[in-house]
Image (spheres, grey):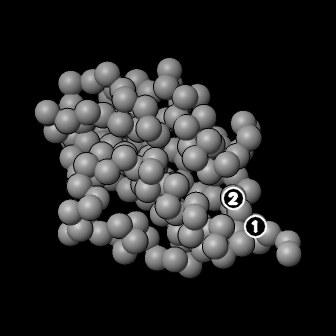
Amino acid sequence: MRIGHGYDVHRLTAGRKLILGGVEIPYEKGLLGHSDADVLTHAVMDALLGAACLGDIGRCFPDTDPAYEGADSLLLLDRVMEMLRSRRLSVGNVDATIIAQRPRLAPYLEEMARNLSRHMGLADGYVNLKATTEEKLGFTGSGEGIAAHAVCLLCREQA
C-alpha cells in the first residue's frame, strides 16, 4: 500500500466559473488558473501522483503547455488513472477537504464525490469529501481563494 497527500489553492476572481469536483457551483466568482482551476480535483490528482512517486500535476500537466489551457480537470484525472493502471496501481480510497469561506458547499459534496469516484473507477463509499470554513482567517477566510487537501491510499494489483 502507498499513501499520498495533495494540496492545491487558487485565487477567486470575477468572470470565471467555479468548478469543484467537476461540479459547477453557482457563485459570483470562479477560480483563476490555466485549466478549469478545480482545486479539489487537483488536490486528489496530486495525492494520487504522490503516492505513485510520479511527481505532481505541475510536472505532468504544466501550465506552460497550451494544450492544458481551460482543460477539464476530470479529464486530466482520467490521464492520471491511466498512469496508475500502467503501473498496476489501483485506488483504495480518497479523503479530501475543501477550505472555503463562501459559497456553502455542503449541497454539492455528494455529486462531487460521485464524479471523482466515477473517474477513478471506484464504487460509492470510497471517496469522502468534507468542506470547512477558515473562520474568516487567512486568504480562504477572507474569500480571496479556495484550497483543498486530499489523501489517498493506492494498492498494488495482483498479477
Q: Tell me the CA gap for discs 1 and 2.
A: 6 Å
Q: Nearer the viewer, residue 22 or 3?
A: 22
Q: Is residue 29 left or right of residue 122?
A: left
Vertical placement of residue 111 versus 123, above or below:
above
Residue at 80% across, 69% down: 157
- Say whether disc 1 or disc 2 marks the residue closer to the N-terminus: 2
Mark 1 residue crowding within 10 angstroms, few (<14) / some (14–19) / many (20+) = some
Mark 1, secondary structure of its residue: strand
The residue indicated by pointer 2 is 91
Q: Position of residue 52 (x, y in %)?
A: 60, 74
Horizontal side of residue 97 vs 30, given as left or right: right
- x 21%, y 31%: residue: 29
Q: Nearer the viewer, residue 72 or 29?
A: 72
**Residue 16 makes an appearance in the image:** yes
Q: Which residue is mark 1?
A: 155
User: Quick one: 158 or 7, which is closer to the camera?
Assistant: 158
Which residue is the extreme one toward the left? 14
Is residue 138 something that shows in the picture? no
Task: Find out whether the residues at labels 1 and 2 contact each other: C-beta distance under 8 Å.
Answer: yes
98 lies left or right of 124:
left
Residue at image coords 14%, 33%: 15
Quarter of the figure that contains the C terminus: bottom right
Image coordinates of residue 55 in percent, x first then y, are 46, 76
